[in-house]
Amino acid sequence: MSIKAVIFDLDGTLIDSMKLWREVDAEFFGSRGIEVPEDLFDYLPQGNSFVQTATYFKNRFNLSDSVESIMQEWTDMVSHHYANTVSLKDGVCEIISLLQCKSIPLGLGTSNSYELAQKVLSQHDIWNCFSAVVTGDLHMMGKPWPDIYIKAAEELKTNPADCLVIEDTLTGVMAGKAAGMTVYAIYDPDSDPQRDDIIELADLHFQTYQEMLEQLHQQLNETL
């Protein structure tokens, strides 16, 4: 493929945050006397965006909370961590530096909210690296539907077939492929239960960003 733009997922891909969100789930449901079900994320009818996950929680568990208050509660629970303690995954800066050196525009396509994405990426001084940001608090179908990635490609003014998506989850890989994009999967332990399916569906799977960096060095030198 000819890489003309790269679109990153956020949680589990750029940042090491999935464990934090599992803690949020436990605290959110525990405060309401609900045990976290094992199949919590097995079927989200409209996708897993911030808005749609909140809607799904409200409907599935008959919560009296509004969708807006659920999203605000989640934001309040993690905001300090996103602004101060959530780390980038090892090798992210090197990948971004390589792509910038090659003048490849970068996009962000995340199920998380704009506020939290801005907080965590600003903390690490890479927020301004992204020319397009599409987040899960917009009213569109979430992953595994392709809408987030298609909109990111539109904002980057790039044909989806010329976009590379970098993802860590099965639903994210499904979304990128459904958008007609090449998808590289990066390992995150939170996705271990779906690892075989991720490897099968993604165009390439990498255990580390160092492995991906070597692949991109070779690919970009061949195509640019």
Image (cartoon, rainbow, N blue to C red):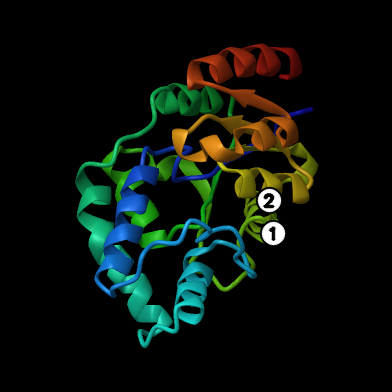
Q: Is residue 168 visible?
A: no
- Name the residue carrying label 1: 145
38 in relation to 19, above or below: below
Q: Earlier in the sequence, mark 1 or mark 2?
A: 1
Q: In what quadrant of the picture does the N terminus appear?
A: top right
Viewer-nearest residue: 121 or 54: 54
Determine whether label 1 and label 2 are within 8 Å by CB. yes
Count of residue discs = 2
Q: Is residue 75 visible?
A: yes
The percent coordinates of residue 171 (x first, y second) are 63, 50
- Name the residue carrying label 2: 175
The percent coordinates of residue 105 (x first, y second) are 58, 38
What residue sits 55% from the left and 15% below the top?
211
Cα–Cα gap, marks 1 and 2? 5 Å
The percent coordinates of residue 195 (x first, y second) are 60, 33
Amino acid of disc 2: Ala
8 in relation to 28, above or below: above
Instruction: Specify whether 176 is left or right of 209.
Output: right
